[in-house]
Amino acid sequence: MTEPAFRSASSLVRALRSGSLGSLELLDHYLARIARHNPTLNAIIAMDVEAARRQARAADVARRRGKPLGPLHGLPMTVKESFDLRGFATTWGLPALKRNIAGDDATAVRRLADAGAVIFGKTNTPVMLADWQTYNPVYGMTCNPWSRDHSPGGSSGGAAAALAAGLTSLELGSDIGGSIRNPAHACGVYGHRPSYGIVPTAGHALPGSDAPLDLNVAGPLARSAADLDLALGVLAGPEAATAGGWQLHLPPERRTRLAEFRVAVVGTLPVAPVDGAIRTSIDALARFLLREKAKVSRTARPKLQPEEVNTLYIHLLRASTSALQSQDSKAFAATLAAADRLRVADHSYYAEQLRGNTLRHRDWVVANNRRHVLHGAWLEFFKDYDLLLCPAAPTTAFPHDHAGERWQREVLVDGKRRSVNEHLFWAGYSGLFGLPSTVAPLGRSPAGLPIGLQIIGPPGGDRTCIRFARLLEREYHAFEIPPAFA
């Protein structure tokens, strides 16, 4: 990949430091590609070109003068629309927030800028970040670079699409229900959901919402696993207000060969069946790992009931996102009444969503305690295995479908219609417990759509997940350029 647009952020930073590539030169290269490709993709939805060019020029001058350079010095990049970026609107896809102009950067955005990044724009999201597709009435629909008829995933869909199409070098996303992992899988790029709480989410909220959301994290997306490591080193750490009281030390990962890893492989589960193309790719990887002398189990699992994990996750997820509902008391009273009318035996997604949206505090405390009890099963599992490998979603990217409510839609799994909400299980399997998860490209389906692998690690084992992804990138499969954007 000699064209700068598709080189890894890590290699671009090295070129910028050496002076073999200029920050303004690289920015203009991306801007030219955006002018050519973004009109049909609609991944990048806001830019301040002149301000970015001023920053890029300043970065070039600083390098020539021998000033200290940060780890991302001069690197042009974008961030998800839902993060505050000074001078840009933060809308979450809501027309009512089109004039919600950020007066300051989100903490994670500020850390990227302080590390030297030139943040030149924002990428698209679904409304309220609440879909595995990316479209909204403010900015319109984003398409998948591998097939414009398909979704790029969500909610960091614009971020993943921009990376895959070579329109940006690095991205900042967020993930409460697979919103980093799902688009990385759908677009064939890398994404990392960090251990819960290690990357500050301040400045990633609707106006008036200051408290961090349960389950929600911020993390990087990239075209290379090494870039995830680079970005995490910049992003992770306590907020300034608490930095004097504690420091973060993520354990380094010293293994350098796949043979040194102990992994369990899960291809599908009855609670959320996985399409055959994805199962086949995961099976092929398991056979490869065995040939590489890794310890591989196809039967080891954390001792959990997947159905219980799924229900508990939906309750706590919807309890968390209930803070984003309308503050109108009549609207909430109607939701509460609907929940009270549910039959005890009704365990449909709609019913569990309603229960979560209206969870009483006492019931939340009970559910949260159960989460901590179940977390112990993961800790026991990680005594014998380093990682669990599993799908990121039940299907590859699916066709655009904007009909009805999101929770009513269906997707095809092995030719049979299944609820799209089954995507949540593969997000919550690790996300419920705050575990780090990396998605890495695994291959492509017979239809030519990307397939991603989810790599789940122990608490604080972020670098273990990413190292394994780096070894797969080197030894098995790496990012591929979508043909229409080469």
Image: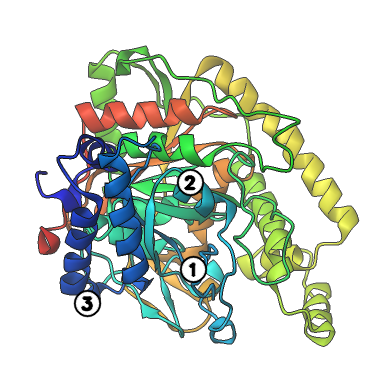
Looking at the rendered structure, the kind of residue marked 3 is Thr
Q: Which quadrant of the figure has residue 315?
A: bottom right
Which mark is in front, 3 or 2?
2
Q: Position of residue 175 (x, y in %)?
A: 53, 53
Left or right for 463, reference 54: right
Mark 2 lies on a secondary structure that is: helix
Left or right for 21, reference 403: left
Q: Residue furthest front?
A: 65
Which mark is in front, 3 or 1?
3
Residue placed at 29% from the left, 37% from the top? 10
Q: Which mark is residue 117?
A: none
Which mark is in front, 2 or 1?
2
Residue placed at 57% from the left, 48% from the top? 428
Mark 3 lies on a secondary structure that is: helix
Q: Which quadrant of the figure has residue 442?
A: top left
Residue 189 seen in this snapshot = no
Residue placed at 36% from the left, 71% from the top? 47
Left or right for 208, reference 485: right
Q: Which mark is residue 131?
A: 1
Q: Who is closer to the viewer here, 356 or 110?
A: 110
Left or right for 17, reference 72: left
Real-space CA distance between mark 3 and mark 2, rounded to the nearest whole angstrom:
33 Å
Is disc 2 in contact with disc 1, using a CB cutoff of under 8 Å?
Answer: no
Q: Position of residue 394 (x, y in %)?
A: 40, 53
Q: Position of residue 257 (x, y in %)?
A: 30, 15
Mark 1 nearby-residue class (10 Å; few <14, some 14–19, many ≥20):
many
Which residue bears the numbered disc 2?
114
Q: Which mark is residue 40?
A: 3
Q: Who is closer to the viewer here, 368 or 59?
A: 59
Looking at the rendered structure, the kind of residue marked 2 is Asp
Screen quadrant of the C terminus: bottom left
